[in-house]
Image: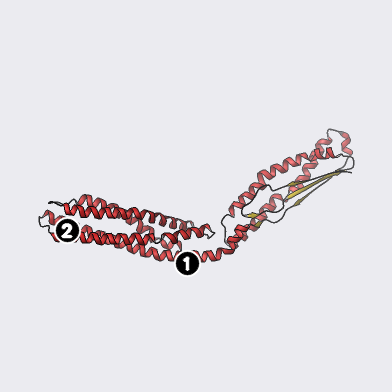
Amino acid sequence: MAEVTRTFELITVQAKNLDLPDGKITLKVSGKEVDTSLLARIMEPVYAYLNDYRKIAINPAIQKYDKEFEGMSDKSEVEKKAKLVNAELKKLVGNLEKEAQNRIKASWEKIKKENKAYTKWKLKIAANITWGVVKIGKSIAALVASSGAKLDEYYKVAKSVYGIAKEVKKAIATESKVREDLMKALEKMAKATKDGKVGKSHITAVEDTVKQYKVKLTAARQKASSMAKPLERLLQLQDDGVAVTKKQEATINSMISQIIEFNTTEQNGRKFADIALKKTKEAQGTLDLKTIKAHAEKVKKAIDIALKVFEVASDIL
């Protein structure tokens, strides 16, 4: 009795986050009168079908599910997803044995029409699928194993960031108050200058407030900069598998951007203070408040944005 047995691999892709099963289908066709070359010819169409099915259904499904596991760390969610994936893949290969046999039979029927002698011959057709369970890869398993500790660390660091953010907010508010005091001193001097009553006390008041303003500006920048490392740590923990919401991620990123921007804000604040001092000393009958106010407004806009950013620090908790 002639017999042809072929094994066809159903999975030909690699997975990053999954351990893939040994997936294959074994086809066996035999007959007393049929030689092996004819048996091989009978089986050819099923190979083409299986190759296409693997290409458009099985491999893409595995790649899709593998991508969905990327970065997952919650144990219950991972287990739930793994169960779903196994069920869906099982459906994909569930009818392959029957389909393969039917296609071999159809091929045989087509060949029998070429030679009536074949109609008296009988074939034995068998198909058997070997399919294991998709398991979680080592990288995801490691994330699941450590997610609890990393999540605890995330909230510990986040709480620290929240505390610093409140201090930053206070420092920024102080900058705003002293900036207003400086403008009041300038306006008072401008009025005195216009009335011809300007004295050294007016200039001294501006000078003293400028010094105080620069100190407050430096303090605000230093407080904001102290948040950089813990914020970067939160992002690193996220990369390590701690699940955070889009709102939390956006809040962290906006704070980091604001810290970087705060260097420019401080520079503009110092420029405003220096010009205020320069214009005060140059005042001859009138004080150029328009130019000074323009610089002050530029700083105010940046500070207002910073206040709004650091006010939402609670969103990371």
Instruction: Rate crowding at label 2 as few (under 14), some (14 to 19) or many (20 or more) other CA atoms within 10 Å.
Output: some
Residue annotated with mark 2 = 203
Dot label at residue 257: none
Judge whether residue 244 can be spotted in this image.
Answer: no
**Looking at the image, is 265 positioned above or below residue 121?**
below
Residue depicted at x 29% and y 52%: 298
Mark 1 vs 2, N-terminal side: 1
**Looking at the image, is 216 positioned above or below residue 37?**
below
Front residue of this view, candidates 34 and 295? 295
Give residue 193's position: percent from left, percent from top. 13, 55
Compared across the picture, whether 39 is left or right of 14 comes to right
Q: Under tag 1, what secondary structure? A: helix
Judge whether residue 215 can be spotted in this image.
Answer: yes
Give residue 206's position: percent from left, percent from top. 20, 59
Front residue of this view, candidates 106 and 14? 14
Residue annotated with mark 1 = 156
Residue depicted at x 66% and y 46%: 57
Give residue 229's position: percent from left, percent from top. 43, 60
Q: Amino acid at mark 1?
A: Lys
Residue depicted at x 46% and y 64%: 157
What distance separates the C-alpha of mark 1 from that of mark 2?
A: 49 Å
Front residue of this view, candidates 38 and 237? 237
Give the total number of marks visible in the rendering: 2
Front residue of this view, candidates 167 and 283? 283
Compared across the picture, whether 214 is left or right of 259 comes to left
Give residue 316's position: percent from left, percent from top. 45, 61
Residue depicted at x 14% and y 56%: 191
Q: Amino acid at mark 2?
A: Ile
Residue farthest along the left direction in this orientation: 196
Location of the N terminus by quadrant is top right
